[in-house]
Amino acid sequence: MNHLLSLLIWLPVLGAVPVLLCGSNRPSAARWVALLVSVATFAASLALLPGYDAATGTMQLAENVSWIPSLGIHYALAVDGISVALIVLTSFVTILVIVGAWEVIQVKTHQYMAAMLVLEGLMIGVFCATDALLFYVFFEAMLIPMFIIIGVWGGPRRVYATLKFFIYTFFGSIFMLVGLIYLHHKTGGSFALADMAQVKLSMTEQSWLFFAFLIAFAVKVPMVPVHTWLPDAHVEAPTGGSVVLAAIMLKIGGYGFLRFSLPIVPDASEAYAWLIIVLSLLAVVYIGYVALVQGDMKKLVAYSSIAHMGFVTLGIFIAFLLVRETGNTEAARLGMQGAMVQMISHGFISGAMFTCIGVLYDRLHTRQIKDYGGVINVMPWFGLFYVLFAMANSGLPGTSGFVGEFMVILAAFSANPWIALFAAFTLIIGAAYTLWMVKRVLWGDITNPHVAEMKDINGREIFVLSSFAAAVLLFGIWPQPLVHLMDASVARIVEQLALTKV
Amino acid sequence: MPNVNDILILLPEIYLVVAACVLLLLDAFLKPAQKGVIHWLGIIVLLVAAWLVIDGQPPQSVTAFGGMFIRDGVAEILKVFSLLVTALIFVYARPYLRDRAIPFGEFYTLTIFATVGILFLISAGSLVTVYLGLELLTLSSYALVALNRDSPLSSEAAIKYFVLGALASGSLLYGMSMVYGATHSLDLATIHAAVGSTEWPQLLTFGLIFMIVGIGFKLGAAPFHMWIPDVYQGAPTSVTIFIGSAQKLAAFAMAYRLLATGMGSVGVAGGSEVLVHQWQLMIAVLAVLSLAIGNLVAIVQTNLKRLLAYSTISHMGYLLIGLVNATPEGYSAAMFYAISYALTSAAAFGIILALARAGFECEEIDDLKGLNQRSPWFAFLMLLVMFSLAGVPPLFGFYGKLLVLESAINAGMLWLAIVGAVAAIIGLYYYLRVVKVMYFDKPTEGTDVRPQSDLSVRWVLSLNALALLVLGFTWGPLFAWCQKAFV
């Protein structure tokens, strides 16, 4: 039996113990141990790629041990192409976060590193779990280290932000728990996602469950109107926290829609697809405008994350319009592919953007755009990366930001040109808010005397930023491997959509 | 006539009474410097009693003294955990008692007598045994609450507890008399057989209502919760921990014996569907009120002991959700909940005890400010306890909630499960506030809150709190044991 997935979950979680044992007196030991653990986890996650057969798209590398026999709860793990991509993303970003925090986190370094590793393991657990209760356990447990990370190492209003983050997310997911218990009751005592996907449900039941899932995942994504925790959490979180939040945690919302809403309640998902599409377009257009007026860089990128995640939900739910109403499976696949590529790509881009802001913040201790200006004169290397990521964020062809959005817009066009029109607004608004920020931060004359004293990025920062840059460019120019990895899995999900469960 | 067999069935209880008397005598003869021996003997006595319970457990349910005393699977589990939790309390309480010069002998013997009361309550097979067990437990508790004689707060709490407790006992007794009138029996099994065919159904209903008042008082379920915050705050913490953990197991046992054994669902031996429906409804009302009042009022508390008091009220709400189901599934969920709550609450008060020292109680939430900087390990233990109380997976407390919500849904009471879910969100806030104070706030200048360096306390407390994490992964066997008890 293959234990690779268990290894991926428990290596970082248990690896946090020696990091903690380093204690507050030996921060550099804690850093090195944490780095070692995260690199080992990344190496193990790379082993998924040859181990996973992308051609079939089924759930593979399964592990299944009965956990609580009388309730039918299993410790069941398995991955498909989508999970593999997200797991590799997670372990990749974690290394960069740990390297990024090297000199930045000086207080209780060992606790920070340990929290990051625990968080990594739990997030990987979310992407592997095929038992609904196990999924829920990881989904909730993940909040604890994030709560600590924002609350201890965050900015001035960190307590407010972290409480809001925790309560919002918990609020969303507790109703999912009730829904899952109800499904457990309906399936006759199984928590396996595959069994839940089989069970027949009336339209009323499906609608209730749909909203239970929606509230859990919409908070996580986040979708308008339950997005308000995100700007607060991002602004107050330390750089590493923001990176993980934007790059991975938000993806768990989109992933949840794929794993829960679509297979378990397909008919209700179809009936309410219009709602999700409207909310997604609202995120793309309205939140885009909100981002435009932000004076705080982190807030701006936080809002831009919401707008970009709008493409993910749009790409997932546009499939219903295509498959069930026009029978256009090809376009539906394209849309969902686009959503998945967008998830991965946004992971890199948003992570990179937040790292860039972190770099500026470490030097000037402000995130206000108006405090900067002319940074390119003192930090040319930084400027290079910043412009690259800004271009990617606004969806320039050749960067990964373009691929996903383009695919979703294409699919939307086959469904309804009007939807495509509104979605395409992002190309204008996204470019507007991102490039305008770049203009005010990088270009122009140096007005703030402190900016003149800023030093360009050091080797460690170059390593982090160039890793992100490599990923952004690689998947922008050559998205084929990523698409191929997820293609068969996406096709299976689209097939399932067509089946009614009433 | 009682025979040898009856005596053997009661062996753990008889042993405990004798041991308590021996301890009392020993305490009188020991010199003040030697009183520490009582502490170790007390722990040993409890552990031996737990061993006697397990070792002498009959394969099937048996009764003694003509059905007055039941020894079944439920009794075994609840007794083992009551004794273990009380032993934990003895470990945690010692430094606290020593620093405050609270007499050792009285505390240990009274607590053991109260534990005997718990054991009788757990094994009660007739209304008389329920009442005797309850009185032994509560009378010892009144004295325990007042143990710190010089503290006005303590005396006030004891008086409140006594007056309200007497009222509740009276109500219970009144209800019992009506049930006796309607069924002509004090024996719970006979009552169960007779409830369906009674000529006085109204009388039975009235009796039920009065008995539920008694049960609600003992559990501390709203609207019979008034005594909980004052007693929790006023009693010495070493006594609060006992009222807040081991006694909850007894309260569950009392509710289970009176409602399920005496008036449970229709089976081979009688029962009345109407009656079950009546108490299900009443328990559901108590559950909703407890969840709402407990959680909402806890939000504004600044005193940690009071906060935990209101949190108890809300937890009893969850426990009652399990009882509402009125099936073995629901009972096992409720029992699991009671056990998980007793272990968690013992750890919570244990940490408060460990942080207190002579002249300092550590009972304001603000006293915990910046604990993570002074003692990261204790802050971490408290974090585990708080997340377990809040019901965040993977901690033990989550699974209790999962089981009671599941039992509510299986019973077709989705609305009750949703109320439980909403209450969990409200409850989350004040548990998070404690974590926030420990981790995010700076320590107050001039204070120095650190755990005492008593090694046994440190180790046992660490094991207790870590068990909440470990049991979060390995709760299966415990749950299977609970389920087996109700088959």
Image (spheres, rainbow, N blue to C red):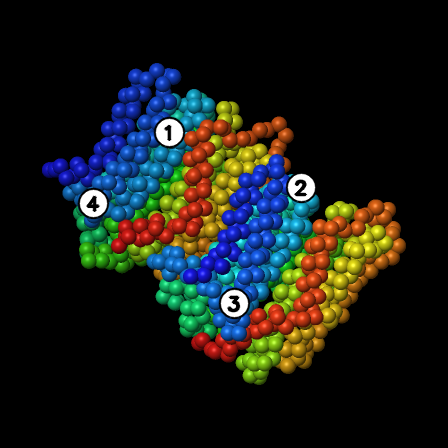
What residue is at 65 percent from the left and 75 percent from the top?
A407
Residue A341 seen in render? yes
Which amino acid is tagged 2? Gln
Left or right: residue A357 versus residue B198 is: right
Question: How crowded is the residue under tag 1: few (<14 C-alpha within 10 Å), some, or many (20+)?
Answer: many
**Residue A483 picture location, percent across and down:** 61, 72
Labels 2, 3: front one: 3
Viewer-side residue, A132 vs B361: A132
Q: Chain of mark 3?
A: A
Q: Which mark is residue B58?
A: 4
Q: Secondary structure at mark 2?
A: loop
For the residue labelled by badge 3, is the local secondary structure a helix, a strand or a loop? loop
Q: Which mark is residue A106?
A: 2
How far apart are the two marked residues, 4 and 2, measured between alpha carbons?
A: 60 Å
- In-image side of B96 versus A315 (left or right): left
Say which residue label 1 marks: B144
Amino acid type at circle 1 is: Leu
Residues tagged by mark 4 and mark 2 found on one chain of the structure: no
Q: Circle 4 sits in a helix, a strand or a loop, which is it?
A: loop
Write the residue at 66% across / 44% down.
Answer: A105
Name the residue carrying label 3.
Answer: A52
**Decide: marks 1, 2 in contact (CB < 8 A)?**
no
Q: Amino acid at mark 3?
A: Tyr
Image quadrant assignment for residue A415: bottom right
Numbered disc in front, either 1 or 2: 2
The residues bearing labels 3 and 4 have C-alpha atoms spaced at a distance of 54 Å
Examine the rendered structure and indicate whether residue B127 appears above or below residue B155. Answer: below
Chain where mark 2 sits? A
CB atoms of marks 1 and 3 within 8 Å: no
How far apart marks 2 and 3 lie (CA) works out to: 40 Å
